[in-house]
Image (cartoon, coloured by chain):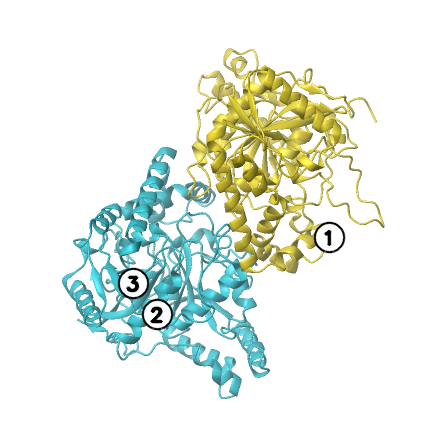
Chain colours: A cyan, B yellow
Amino acid sequence: MDSIARTDYRPDSFQQLTFHDATKGFSEGADTPRAYLERCLETIAAREPVVQAFVVVNEAGAREAADASAARWKAGKPLSPIDGMPIGIKDLIETRDMPTQMGCEAYRGNFPRRDSAMIRAMRDAGAIILGKTVTTELGQAHPGPTSNPFNPRHTPGGSSSGSAAAVGARMVPAAIGTQVGGSIIRPASYCGNVALKPTQGAINRGERQGLSQSTAGVHAGGIEDMWLVAKAIALRAGGDPGAPALFGPDTPPAAQRPARLIVMEGEGWAVMDEDSRRAFELLLEKLRAAGVELLTRADAAAIEAFERSIANAKDVSNDIGAFETRWSQQNLIEAHPDGVSQRFLARQKRGMAMTLDDYRGRLLEREAMRRALADIAPLADGLISPASPGPAPVWEGDKPGQPLAPRPTGDTVSNSATSALGVPCVTVPMTAVRGLPMGVQLIGHPHMDARAAGMARWVLETIEPVCV
Amino acid sequence: MDSIARTDYRPDSFQQLTFHDATKGFSEGADTPRAYLERCLETIAAREPVVQAFVVVNEAGAREAADASAARWKAGKPLSPIDGMPIGIKDLIETRDMPTQMGCEAYRGNFPRRDSAMIRAMRDAGAIILGKTVTTELGQAHPGPTSNPFNPRHTPGGSSSGSAAAVGARMVPAAIGTQVGGSIIRPASYCGNVALKPTQGAINRGERQGLSQSTAGVHAGGIEDMWLVAKAIALRAGGDPGAPALFGPDTPPAAQRPARLIVMEGEGWAVMDEDSRRAFELLLEKLRAAGVELLTRADAAAIEAFERSIANAKDVSNDIGAFETRWSQQNLIEAHPDGVSQRFLARQKRGMAMTLDDYRGRLLEREAMRRALADIAPLADGLISPASPGPAPVWEGDKPGQPLAPRPTGDTVSNSATSALGVPCVTVPMTAVRGLPMGVQLIGHPHMDARAAGMARWVLETIEPVCV
């Protein structure tokens, strides 16, 4: 294993790739979107053999788009602040110029030749749709080939495996992910990204409306690019049908020091290893020292009630998703009996065993969580929680003759609650555990995405990261 | 024009085609689903040349399904009460064995070879997916070839033109329609159907989740079949993601006399012709005589406030739909510039001119309507209103050299409010105006579909229809 493959991640010295600070050069002639793109392609050429973040890269299309962008910047007429930004797209999302194969054998060669809402919006904003990034099979458990950019023995997380790894490997400044259970925030945590899982519905999911808790979001090297991409989409494609779309400023939210934060334990707390918990607690101490008041379940009956309401969030989330997708998945299995994995079939079994009344019961549990969250809104500016129960676990593939590993891309346990709650989460790479990144998520109330981003920015800019 | 083509519709003597009362014969051997199907096919052969309700009929597949159903009934093991029922499917909805061409040149030959959620559910319940029925272009304004089964000079309504006409012509006992503005209830009114537009989200729309106010519903010859089809779908495919799906009994709701009804005027009131209004008012008199108390906007401040809240429902609905579909429609126009109609392009212009904030404003107006509706819930058991502003208008095609007729399939003005409100509506053919049917809609509060159906059944079974 060469030295590029394994690095000892240190959050204080690792340089993320950013775009927002490059555009001044585009205007002044010191840099161009084409040169920026070429630097990304060089990094991809160097890192991709081990990281394997991409399913396909559209080099020719990207170069053409970059040249068009360069002309706009030169003329002083960029289409948006992300004009010329190379972006990776999770391969669940339809793109007119690249196949959409969803990490699933049954979709091999699938090429609908149309742009999803968010893809259209980004193109209309001048962004460069550079390539499709690896997803786990249909965004579920079965992993793709991507490895963690900081140590290839470890998983990049999933299901947005390639998007998180591409940003972590500095191949692109931003990439699009999607989250039903923990598919943006967890891989972002494992790969040292900043990432936004927005309020449910805040970014138009286009053709992917089949789940009631699922969001499209942005992985990036920094808060600025993360926000600019999200906003560029929302302004042009809106949110999901019926949703008011992402609220907040057109420019990146300023850093905002929270006066008070609630420390959310959730289901993840109990399964954290000692190092990871210590890293998070050391970070909390630094926050306290910086004047942030921290509240826990011991401090208020409403927080305790909230924690109890989310104690079963993972099962609730999984059941809701399994029921909502069972009809389309059953179609898929019947049409392609050998085109899906054993992991996929196991999940489908769960959905097929449910009754409509089981599903209604799960919706009511989710609604109860949301009410409990509303009850703690007056107590603090938001919540803080580990973005994953630890750093990326080792994953070296299924072993022949052994039962399938239950969680090849890690555990959603730190994310199921915030997914079910429909709240905005921003993860920032503030801790490192045993040489790998682990994120911390700042969590807002519904539609308070800008506040969550502003608090995350303040943490990132003010607090020194923790290495354990 | 032959005598089949034009009939003088009389609601008291017109015999609807029903299915629920045929299944006893299937069990006892006096009839079979195959024989029932053959009778439908005979009617189609006789009426289709003029009515043109179907895009395609899958005779071979239907016969095979009918024989399988016959064997189940004979063995005493039907899959559901609708096992063996031949059903027409609006051609917006995907079916694995027939193309889905959406009345749109750009989708000519489109054949995704998969079943939408509701189609899967009906097949799993043993129903026979008989054919695809004509829709206006993409469910919008541009009409298809279907004519009104009671007079071919008149429109069948739209966008569920073929579904309404096929039921009105006794070709099938039930057909699936969809409604965004007035696309189930209006054509059902024009074609003498019973029909349910359920609570928003109560029947799973499958791949068609791109609009925040849009429902799939059932056209039928009677309340019993209408309900059994809706329930068969909801039990198997649920509702839209996140929705609790259709509530109510598994068997058709019993007739239920309302103690009090609110007469909803809405935008349609002002544009009704004299005969149509008189027919509706005569019906109200019969309801009063049967002991139903009727309240109007003059009777309570809350009703007046409600009426004011919905006074602009048509524009609100149209803008919401235009914004939500603009990205996918722009894709379509770019890919097939000659594949869409001038009417379609005009609507797209409306959507493209809107900003995100315009859309948010329309959502707030819709939300205000829904709050005003909730405020009148304690006053009555439900609402009653004409299902269309009159009987089907004449439509004989665009005239060369003339501007495009603005409403070739009639006016949604009596339906936009109930669509925007997301409430259940059941239309029953209780009036005839100048020899053509005109429906009356019983309207419930959200999730009270069974009550709306029960009240509609009571009206249908108890009150004598009105001919003007």
Marks 1 and 2: in contact by CB < 8 Å?
no
Q: Nearer the viewer, mark 1 or mark 3?
A: 3
Which quadrant is home to the N terminus of chain A? bottom left
Horizontal arrangement in the rendering, residue B125 relative to residue B304 (left or right): left
Tell me how far mark 3 sits from mark 2, CA to CA: 25 Å
| Label 1 sits on residue | B342
User: Can residue B55 be spotted in the picture?
Assistant: no
Q: How far apart, in angstroms, are the residues tagged by discs 1 and 3?
A: 50 Å
Viewed as shown, does residue A27 lie left or right of B106? left
Task: Please report, as a chain letter, where disc 2 is located.
Answer: A
Q: Amino acid at mark 3?
A: Gln
Instruction: Choose the circle earlier in sequence order: 3 or 2.
Output: 2
For badge 2, the amino acid type reads Val
- The secondary element bearing badge 1 is classed as helix
- Disc 1 with disc 3 on a shared chain: no
In the drawing, what numbered circle is on residue A441?
A: 3
Q: Which type of secondary structure does the marked residue at label 3 adopt?
A: strand
Which dot marks residue A51? 2
Where residue A406 sits in the image (x, y, percent)? 26, 51
- Location of residue B107 in the rendering, given as x and y in whole percent from the top left corner: 64, 49
Q: Amino acid at mark 1?
A: Gln
